[in-house]
Amino acid sequence: MNRTPGTSPFRYPNDWNEASLAEVATIVTGRTPVTSDPGNFGRDVLFVTPGDIGKTKYLLNSERRLSFRGAAQSRTIPTNSVLFVCIGSTIGKLGLSTRTVSFNQQINGLVCKPGFSPEYLYYALSLVAPAVKQKASEQAVPLLNKRDFSKIKLYFPSFDEQCAISQCLSDVDTLIDALDKLIAKKRNIKHGAMQVLLTRKTRLPGFNGEWTTKRLGDVAAMSSGGTPPSKVKEYYGGNIKWASIADMTGSGKYLSRTEVNLSNAGLNNSAAVLYKAPIILYAMYASLGEVSICQEEVSSSQAILGIAPNEQIDLEFLYYLLVAYKPTVKSLGQQGTQSNLNKGMVQRFEFSVPSNKNEQRAIASVLADMDAEIDALVAQKEKTALIKTGMMQELLTGRTRLL
């Protein structure tokens, strides 16, 4: 290993050494066995493709298996090796193997040489992966060939410090993974609560009144939006929020901002409608059944219905009814170039609703509390991920030392 001035944007400690990937690891490019031979496939060895990498730090599983014969035609690497996607749109994704695996030709495997920690190599490559991907994407087909890949240079402290840094970052990853599992668990609990509370299989204490079947068109007014001509600049850039389905899918329960705003001229010279707040926004195209609540005046594209409940139904209760109905609505879309709904179809949706509006509010409150708990956990996870990013910048460049 040697040290080449000017090869990195970071300033590394003098006792850290620069080394290429070829110097620190044996690099193996994957290969796919003959697919026409069924004898190459079985239950013996995991066969990894880019879609299996990057979901978590550790590569725990794959949907594909090879026989030992198929694995011999492929390429294998042992437990605790690094996998790096070098071809395609997911270039730069990494993972650590938890067992011996085979992999295809879009992936390079790195088996660390003595004196180098696989976990440290994983984190160090994670730090430079965005720059590697950007450079590779300058080509028509994103590609990082083995020769160029092997020349990538990283900085390495002593083996003991590599291990200390890896352990510190691994502890944060463990916390993020635990939060992911807790979020998934809370979402499953909420899903179960919706199934029993919105179908009166379970009644909240103090409520025993009747439920009646209602058509959505009988308990809510609704209208779709419109889109001003995009070439007329004067129609855009004003103070009127204009919601798209992309805004809804990115917002969660409450939509508070939109990527695009209309001017008064844009609103007046199109089919766009200014919905009074609060309003339920409901997607009729593409992401069928996506639902959001907007607590401010808002307009929308024609792909969205604005639904305003009347006095018979609580707005938040209706929101949860529509969320629960989403799996069903997927099968109702008219088939064309893409599935879609229309206002008439949505008006004909039928739901069982408590006659007592206080029961509606109580059910909505229970589910809203669950949403708030999930949102807090998601925020905690996002904050932890940001902390980890900062820690990587500090620890992997030697600005903060552990030893």
Image: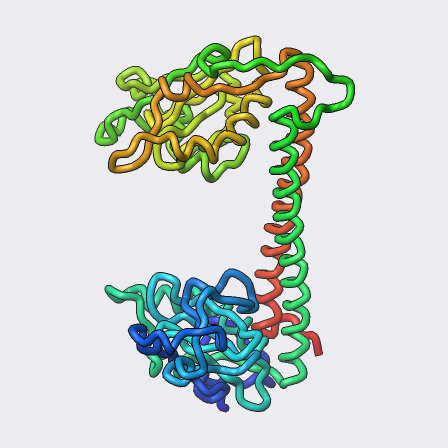
Counting from the top left corner in percent of width and height, residue 71 is at: 42, 81
Counting from the top left corner in percent of width and height, residue 119 is at: 58, 75
How are the residues colored? rainbow
Query: Which residue appears at 44% of the width and 22% of the height?
Result: 298
Direction from residue 8 to residue 373 in the image, left or right: right
Is any part of residue 367 visible from this angle? yes
Counting from the top left corner in percent of width and height, residue 64 is at: 44, 68
Q: Nearer the viewer, residue 277 or 236?
A: 277
Q: Is residue 355 above or below residue 18?
A: above
Query: Which residue appears at 64% of the width and 55% of the height?
Result: 384
Q: Nearer the viewer, residue 115 or 49?
A: 49
Q: Is residue 309 above or below residue 248?
A: above
Q: Is residue 323 above or below residue 388?
A: above
Quarter holding the C terminus is bottom right
Query: Which residue appears at 63% of the width and 57% of the height?
Result: 176
Q: Quadrant of residue 265?
A: top left
Direction from residue 162 to residue 48 in the image, left or right: left
Is any part of residue 7 visible from this angle? no
Direction from residue 300 to residue 270 in the image, left or right: left
